[in-house]
Amino acid sequence: MTDSPDTAEPAVVVHGIANCDSVKKARSWLDVNGVAYHFHDFKKRGVSAEQLASWMAELGWEKLLNRQGTTWRKLDDQAKASIQDAAAAAELMQAQPSVIKRPVVRWGDGEFTVGFDTAVFTHRALG
């Protein structure tokens, strides 16, 4: 995917899972506000190790790891306790992308945000 003006693919990319409420809210907000975007369903298409490393470098693994979601809650206590650093978190997120907080959005300037917040979306998309 490129961000050059010669391509028809939008510069904004929403990474998430289609049935996630936060992703639904984010996509709805973008639709209502006329912001073109590409949706990457990482439950179906996965997340590459390179992409995950990029997100972790910019956002931090602690922010990406969704400790409130169903996938985390289903982990046994030993598995939860083993997530003490970026390497362990990356391994878990690669194996179970549903444990990644959603949505992860790449904006037109190449920066990323995680989660849905109307104020952040307004600032980032409508500036």
Image: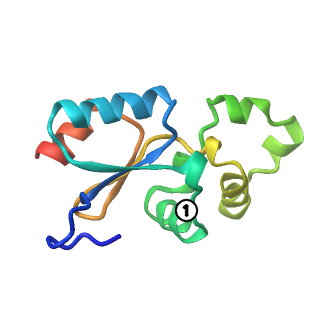
Q: Is residue 119 visible?
A: no
Residue count near mark 1 (Cα–Cα under 10 Å), binned few <14, some 14–19, many ≥20: some
At 21% from the left and 48% from the top, the residue drawn is: 36
Quick check: 90 above or below 74?
below
Number of on-image labels: 1
Q: Nearer the viewer, residue 114 or 38?
A: 38
Q: Residue furthest left?
A: 127
Residue 121, by quadrant, is: top left
| Residue 88 locus on image (x, y percent) | 74, 59
| Residue 2 locus on image (x, y percent) | 30, 72
| Residue 61 locus on image (x, y percent) | 57, 54
On the image, numbered disc 1 is attached to which residue? Answer: 52
Q: Nearer the viewer, residue 61 or 25?
A: 25
| Residue 50 locus on image (x, y percent) | 55, 71
The image quadrant where one finds the N terminus is: bottom left
Residue 47, by quadrant, is: bottom right
At 21% from the left and 63% from the top, the residue drawn is: 8
Determine the secondary structure under disc 1.
helix
Q: Is residue 52 left or right of residue 80?
A: left
Q: Residue furthest front?
A: 8
At 11% from the left and 46% from the top, the residue drawn is: 127
| Callout 1 amino acid | Leu
Q: Is residue 28 left or right of residue 99?
A: left
At 27% from the left and 49% from the top, the residue drawn is: 37
Q: Is residue 113 visible?
A: yes
